[in-house]
Image (tube, grey):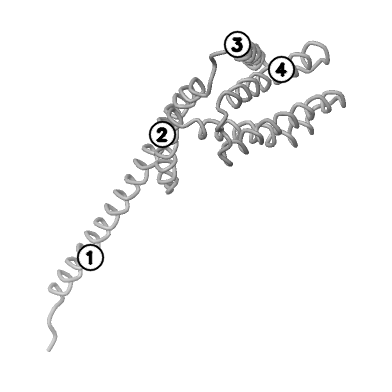
């Protein structure tokens, strides 16, 4: 049976994810930081695979411009959270709101233009996800009361789902590990039983041999 120790890491990550998710509801700096990190990772990790697979130069150019702007936005949010420059909370709330609105709206706009006008093929679920993204971007932009608290609750929900997934997956890995331990111990017991039976047989054979003086 195959086994591993990845379940330990999954349990730890589930606990960290859950703790950070709960903390984000109460700390605006953490929400800013997590949002910025997510945007930067989403942008930078797409660069090489995306640009290599797009066939038209104009598609590569448009997507690269979007990635650059998204990375700048994410970097600004990380900088604001890391340096503690949030004394003027009203200002940074507006910056945060419009940054998120731009991120969602720009991603959907680039995607829809690529599909409709530039002949890029796509899947149906991906199309509707980007329709949702442009709707979400518009909603954030026109909602004056939108703030980090809303995003904090959303990230908490995502954290709970992620922690539950990691916990269940880790539990499955732990069950396999314990099953391996059970089989390992049962194997040792069987081996001892076989050795004991061999010793009994050898003793009986010795007793059956005729005694020669």
Residue 84, relative to residue 146: is it above or below? below
Q: Please state the horizontal and vertical placement of residue 179, each as a whole percent of the image.
A: 32, 44
Q: Which residue is mark 3?
A: 139
- Vertical placement of residue 105 versus 34, above or below: above
Point 58% across, 41% down: residue: 83
Which residue is drawn at the image coordinates 71% and 17% (left, top)? 122
Label 4 – label 1 distance at C-alpha: 68 Å
Q: Nearer the viewer, mark 3 or mark 1?
A: 3
Tag of residue 130: none
Callout 1 crowding tier (Cα within 10 Å): few <14, some 14–19, many ≥20 = few
Q: CA distance from mark 4 to mark 2?
A: 34 Å
Q: Point out which mark residue 122 bears.
A: 4
Q: Are marks 4 and 3 in contact (CB under 8 Å)?
A: no
Can you tell which quarter of the image residue 113 is in? top right
Q: Could you say where residue 209 lies in the image, as x and y percent from the top left? A: 16, 76
Residue at mark 2: 18
Tag 2 or tag 4, which sits nearer the N-term?
2
Residue nearest the observer in this picture, 3 or 156:
156
Asked if marks 4 and 1 touch (Cβ < 8 Å), the reply is no
Density class for disc 3 (Cα within 10 Å; few <14, some 14-19, many ≥20) is some
* Residue at the disc numbered 1: 198
Within the image, what quadrant is residue 72 found in? top right
């Amino acid at each position: 049976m195959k086994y591993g120790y990845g379940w330990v890491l999954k349990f730890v990550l589930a606990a960290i994810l859950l703790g950070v998710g709960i903390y984000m509801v109460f700390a605006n700096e953490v929400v800013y930081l997590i949002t910025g990190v997510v945007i930067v990772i989403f942008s930078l990790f797409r660069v090489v695979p995306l640009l290599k697979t797009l066939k038209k130069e104009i598609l590569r150019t448009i997507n690269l411009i979007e990635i650059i702007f998204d990375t700048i936005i994410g970097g600004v949010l990380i900088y604001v959270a890391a340096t503690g420059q949030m004394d003027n909370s009203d200002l940074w709330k507006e910056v945060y709101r419009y940054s998120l609105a731009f991120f969602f709206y720009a991603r959907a706009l680039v995607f829809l233009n690529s599909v409709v006008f530039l002949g890029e093929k796509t899947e149906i679920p991906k199309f509707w996800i980007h329709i949702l993204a442009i709707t979400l971007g518009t909603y954030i932009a026109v909602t004056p009361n939108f703030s980090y608290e809303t995003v904090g609750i959303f990230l908490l929900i995502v954290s709970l789902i992620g922690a539950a997934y990691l916990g269940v997956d880790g539990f499955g890995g732990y069950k396999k590990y314990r099953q391996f331990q059970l089989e390992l111990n049962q194997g040792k017991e069987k081996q001892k039983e076989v050795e004991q039976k061999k010793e009994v047989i050898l003793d009986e054979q010795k007793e059956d041999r005729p005694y020669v003086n």
